[in-house]
Image (tube, rainbow, N blue to C red):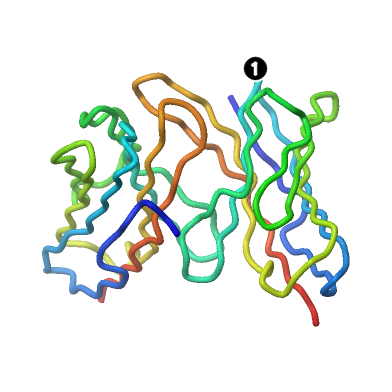
Amino acid sequence: DTEVTQTPKHLVMGMTNKKSLKCEQHMGHRAMYWYKQKAKKPPELMFVYSYEKLSINESVPSRFSPECPNSSLLNLHLHALQPEDSALYLCASSPSAGGLFFGEGSRLTVL
Amino acid sequence: AQSVTQLDSHVSVSEGTPVLLRCNYSSSYSPSLFWYVQHPNKGLQLLLKYTSAATLVKGINGFEAEFKKSETSFHLTKPSAHMSDAAEYFCVVSDFRGNAGNMLTFGGGTRLMVKP
């Protein structure tokens, strides 16, 4: 069972909606990540938070807004998305070195 | 710069036969290497990792991989495929950047199909 929990599992939203994706981990990891994955492609990095500070933003459009309220939580706020933003959004966490632990993902559909 | 090449986009095997998924990497220093598996509509699950200890790494579900520095390869194997192994497999190299976290470079993925 994954120790990174993402909610909701599925989200359908219109282009004018505001919604949020949530991610939680209780492994004490201090780095957390958002990835976007399109069908039949590897995940693409969006953001990295380290010690609750944004350390990497891979030139993601401002309609995606990350937030890290504390060391266990990571949110991704969504506003004015486009249909091409429909994808699987994966959250992950990692210890100081080593592999990432991924959640099950949130499947987003933008109408 | 790092790169990962998975040599086969699709591999098809019969149940009970061996599995070989090939991966070559490029890295300017001693890499950390991983294999992840992704079942349909699921997240990525860590199968195994190499972090400069033993070159033959054993993972979950009977998978193992051998790190060969001279060949810059990290191929994934399993002696006997099971129907539940059908999934997408990603070979990954990791670059640890201190407080900036771990930067992963993914291969393009290999879809494993298992025939009854």
Residue A30 position within the rendered picture, expressed as x and y whole percent measured from the top left = 31, 31
- Give the residue displayed 46% in from the left and 59% down from the top: B43
| Crowd rating for badge 1 (residues with CA inside 10 Å; few <14, some 14–19, many 20+) | few
Secondary structure under the numbered disc 1 in the rendered image:
loop
- Give the residue displayed 79% in from the left and 79% down from the top: B115
| Residue sticking out furthest to the bottom | B116
Give the quarter of the image for residue A93. Answer: top left
Q: Chain of mark 1?
A: B
Disc 1 marks a residue whose amino acid type is: Tyr
Residue B10 position within the rendered picture, expressed as x and y whole percent measured from the top left = 74, 64
For the N terminus of chain A, give its image quadrant.
Answer: bottom left
Give the quarter of the image for residue A88. Answer: bottom left
In this rendered view, identify the residue nearer to me: A1 or B89: A1
| Residue sticking out furthest to the right | B17
Q: How many marks?
A: 1
> In this rendering, is residue A26 above or below A90?
above
In this rendered view, identify the residue nearer to me: B115 or A62: B115
Position of residue B72 in the picture relative to residue B61 (left or right): right
Residue B102 position within the rendered picture, expressed as x and y whole percent measured from the top left = 45, 30
The residue at which mark 1 appears reads as: B29
Residue A71 position within the rendered picture, expressed as x and y whole percent measured from the top left = 22, 36
In this rendered view, identify the residue nearer to me: A106 or A70: A70
For the C terminus of chain A, give its image quadrant.
Answer: bottom left
Position of residue B34 in the picture relative to residue B102 (left or right): right
In this rendered view, identify the residue nearer to me: A74 or A41: A74
Position of residue A92 in the picture relative to residue B82 (left or right): left
Position of residue B72 in the picture relative to residue A70 (left or right): right
> In this rendering, is residue A63 above or below B97?
below
